[in-house]
């Protein structure tokens, strides 16, 4: 059965489908406890969710990847989902180091990274800083400098997503009353980071696929095209009929893009 939730009414009411059972735990790192879950076997793929969300937002992608023989590692970014944080400001570099800490704890030497929004920034910064740990980056719906961001405009889809994130945070977080602080702190990071130049992008030498929805609420399509031109050998895929929330709205075509990326990686 084809899933289509373009307005996110299903997501608002029920969330994404529940994740299959896996090996989960917490990794202590840099003042935080980072939640992870590992499922399946095979080549490791780390899924990094968007800001304010959690790993459960990948509910349509995890079974698909398991069916195709991949080991899936989910990580709740610091201060989000089941993970905790300390009082230091958020940064993508810090969250990238959390991913490495989880990889070390699970004895994963190298993995493919699939990032969505904030998770994409985290993945790209990790690949730039530690290319030996990254077999490739699937970069969906994100910017690498402030010029890529559109002016914010509230929409019913955004309101429904925010409503779901608010409810999930209250149910999952060890600090369920701090959602508004999370929103403020993440917003500050997103306004000021990352700020990569074309020269910085040219130094990224892992395989990269840039995926962008033409109707994304936050990111300019021209920015995705600029990233694809600036990162050596990067591939660009543009999605139609979906927005910033393609993995939830129309997961089947999104999953096909992810699988094509993974199958195209060396080895």
Image: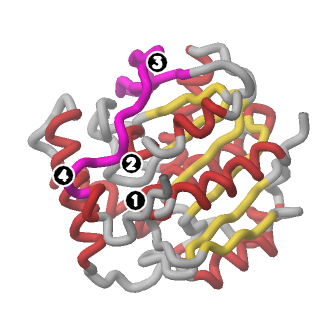
Q: Secondary structure at mark 3?
A: loop
Q: Which mark is residue 166?
A: 4
Q: Earlier in the sequence, mark 4 or mark 2?
A: 2
Left or right position of 72 against 170: right
Residue identified by numbered label 3: 22
Do labels 1 and 3 touch, CB within 8 Å?
A: no
Q: Secondary structure at mark 4?
A: helix
Q: Which residue is mark 1?
A: 189
In terms of sequence position, does the residue under pointer 2 or pointer 1 come before the other? Answer: 2
Q: Is residue 199 magenta?
A: no
- Which marked residue is nearer to the observer: mark 4 or mark 1? 4
Q: Give the residue at mark 2.
A: 90
> Which of pointers 4 and 2 indicates the residue nearer the eye?
4
Residue sitting farthest toward the left: 177
Cα–Cα span, label 1 and label 3: 31 Å
Helix, strand or loop at mark 1: helix
What kind of element bears circle 2?
Answer: loop
In this orientation, does residue 264 appear? Answer: yes
At 46% from the left and 18% from the top, the residue drawn is 22
Query: How many callouts does the rendering have?
Result: 4
Q: Eyeballing the image, is 73 above or below 257?
A: above
Instruction: Give residue 244's position: percent from left, percent from top.
Output: 46, 68
For the residues bearing labels 4 and 1, Cβ distance under 8 angstroms: no
Q: Is residue 147 visible?
A: no
Spatial distance from mark 4 to mark 1, Cα to Cα?
19 Å
Pick the quarter of the image with the C terminus: top right
Q: x%, y% of residue 202?
A: 82, 64
Indicate the position of residue 117 as horizontal and vertical percent values: 49, 59
Q: What whole-number distance in Å separates the C-alpha atoms at marks 2 and 3? A: 28 Å
Relative to 51, 70 lies left or right: right
Disc with the residue nearer the chain's start (3 vs 4): 3
Magenta residues, start to end: 12-39
């Amino acid at each position: 059965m084809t899933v289509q939730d373009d307005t996110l009414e299903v997501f608002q009411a029920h969330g994404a489908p529940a994740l299959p059972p896996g090996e989960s735990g917490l990794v202590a790192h840099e003042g935080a406890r980072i939640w992870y879950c590992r499922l399946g076997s095979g080549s490791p793929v780390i899924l990094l969710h968007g800001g304010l969300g959690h790993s459960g937002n990948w509910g349509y992608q995890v079974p698909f990847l398991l069916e195709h023989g991949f080991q899936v590692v989910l990580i709740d970014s610091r201060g989000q989902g089941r993970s905790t944080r300390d009082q230091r400001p958020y940064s993508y570099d810090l969250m990238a180091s959390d991913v490495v800490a989880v990889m070390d704890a699970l004895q994963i030497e190298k993995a493919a990274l699939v990032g969505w929004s904030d998770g994409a920034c985290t993945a790209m910064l990790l690949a730039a800083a530690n290319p030996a740990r990254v077999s490739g980056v699937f970069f969906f719906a994100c910017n690498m400098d402030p010029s890529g961001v559109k002016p914010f405009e509230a929409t019913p889809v955004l309101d429904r997503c925010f409503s779901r994130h608010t409810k999930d945070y209250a149910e999952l977080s060890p600090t369920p009353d701090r959602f508004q602080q999370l929103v403020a702190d993440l917003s500050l990071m997103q306004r000021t980071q990352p700020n990569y130049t074309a020269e910085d992008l040219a130094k990224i030498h892992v395989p990269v696929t840039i995926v962008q929805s033409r109707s994304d609420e936050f990111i300019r399509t021209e920015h995705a095209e600029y990233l694809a031109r600036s990162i050596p050998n990067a591939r660009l895929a543009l999605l139609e009929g979906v927005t910033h929330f393609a993995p939830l709205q129309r997961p089947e075509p999104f999953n096909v893009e992810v699988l094509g990326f993974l199958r195209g990686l060396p080895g």
